[in-house]
Amino acid sequence: MLSSVLVTRSPCLSQSPASVDPSSRALSRRAEESPPVPGRSGGESASTHDGVPRRQLLCGADLFRPGHLTSAYPRPVADALPNDFRPAARVTPEQAPLPREASVVIVGGGVMGVSIAFHLAEAGVGDVLLLERAALGSGSTCKAAGGIRAQFSDPLNVQLGARSLQAFERFRERPGQDIDLRQVGYLFLLDMEEDVAAFESAVSMQNDLGVDSRMVGPDEVRRLCPLVRTEDLLAAAWSPRDGHCTPESVVLGYAGAARRLGAGLRTGVEVLDVETAGGAVAGVVTSHGTVRTPTVVCAAGAWSAQIGAMAGVPLPVTPYRRQILFTEPIADLPPGLPMTIDFATTFYFHGEGRGLLMGMSDPDEPASFRVDTDDAWLPRLTDAMERRAPGLLDVGVTGGWAGLYEVTPDHIALIGSSTTVPGFVYATGFSGHGFLQAPAVGEVVRDLVLGDPPVLDIAPLSVGRFASLEAGSADHARPEVNLV
């Protein structure tokens, strides 16, 4: 049973190959876009290999240990990976020296950084340079659950999510990449009156902004997700256009397109300092030399506070570990399961291959950069499953991993240009929503760099809102309710 696997056999999460540092998982979906591999039956799901989710297989492969990748995956898959995601990318920088100058330097090669690089290059900005200290997508992006939605309580989050959702729907054409988009919907399960009232208000606002969300009752919940227990449910919030896709493929699409448009994406390069002259950005010092630039974009995710400190720009971003796990294949798994969230406990799951990807937050998790897995959260997860989806307790676990949320005090992003250090632009602190908002944020940052009015008014997301709060003003307080 899953409960016994989690509680008494949970060391498998730290010992199994599938729980190796998931930074090695970058671009696992590339495998799905490669020619069929020998031994794969014609009826097998495109998102699995021998019944195991493909994302999990490459999570378990240590891409940075030479020769190990091919032992975990067929040779055609290993050969399909770009150099940025292969073993040498971690230990050896590209042979060509860094340019001495760049018009824009982007710090961070996750989904946010590559989206920004693509949108800048597409707009004709020359000499765009992205710097990533490890491999592209190897930080928080490769550990994301992949959910995409416009269901939020904050109007700006709704707009960022909705605009990004449109981009994900067109991703095959622009920038040109299959991302395994599954628009199976998002379903927030509610069993407390105050939560129902909050979501009813949010749904009304979402509808005003053009989002097709609605409140549904327990009978509709059972139809949408037969796995859940509904006896104590009062209602649920449902948005059929939401869903999930593959973060690694999104990184691949943006990175490849940015390169084709002339941007430079360099891996294995660590930013050590941000230089200023006359109070403005003047360059970046890296592990492989100094690059002169008038503009630095901080897209470093959970590590953004350190980058901001280099430039003298405080960015209140704190890292918190989150863990997820995979189940074994489930017989008769209902097709098209929505991303389902038990809001009171934050327990969530969605289909992944022939099984499920599952996770939840842990309120006892301290701030840290830890990305190892442990068992402390598993009893809480088991309790939530017994409460909401007891049938899943009989399902085995095949592995899991841990990643980082980049959290701000109000759980809403920091996007803007520094008012104290000209040339320093930031897009960070997304508090679990960065992957799903990356396409729209790439557009916004492009506009900030170009000096154009942003496609969305993101002035309220400036880091200055926290100074206003400290001064006793609540004008810029934007606490998000729809958190997972």
Image: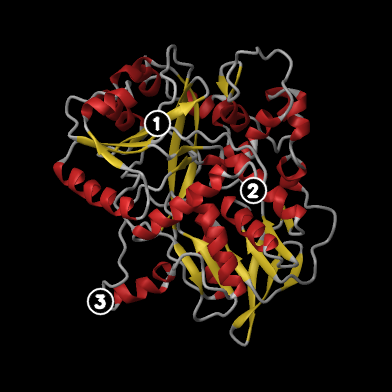
What residue do we see at 65% from left, 13% from top? Answer: 42
Tell me, for residue 472, which label it has, or none: 3
Farthest residue, direction right: 96
Vertical relation: 241 (above or below) 440: above
Q: CA distance from mark 1 to mark 2?
A: 26 Å
Farthest residue, direction left: 193
Q: CA distance from mark 3 to mark 2?
A: 45 Å
Badges 3 and 1: C-beta atoms under 8 Å apart?
no
Crowd rating for badge 3 (residues with CA inside 10 Å; few <14, some 14–19, many 20+)? few
| Mark 1 element type | loop
Q: Quadrant of residue 289?
A: bottom right
The three-letter code of the residue at mark 1 reads Pro
Q: Quadrant of the C terminus?
A: top left
Vertical relation: 153 (above or below) 288: above
Q: CA distance from mark 3 to mark 1?
A: 41 Å
Q: Earlier in the sequence, mark 3 or mark 1?
A: 1
What residue do we see at 78% from left, 49% from top? Answer: 92
The three-letter code of the residue at mark 3 reads Gly
Vertical relation: 393 (above or below) 221: above
Tell me, for residue 338, which label it has, or none: 1
The three-letter code of the residue at mark 2 reads Arg
**To which residue does mark 2 refer?**
174
| Mark 2 element type | loop
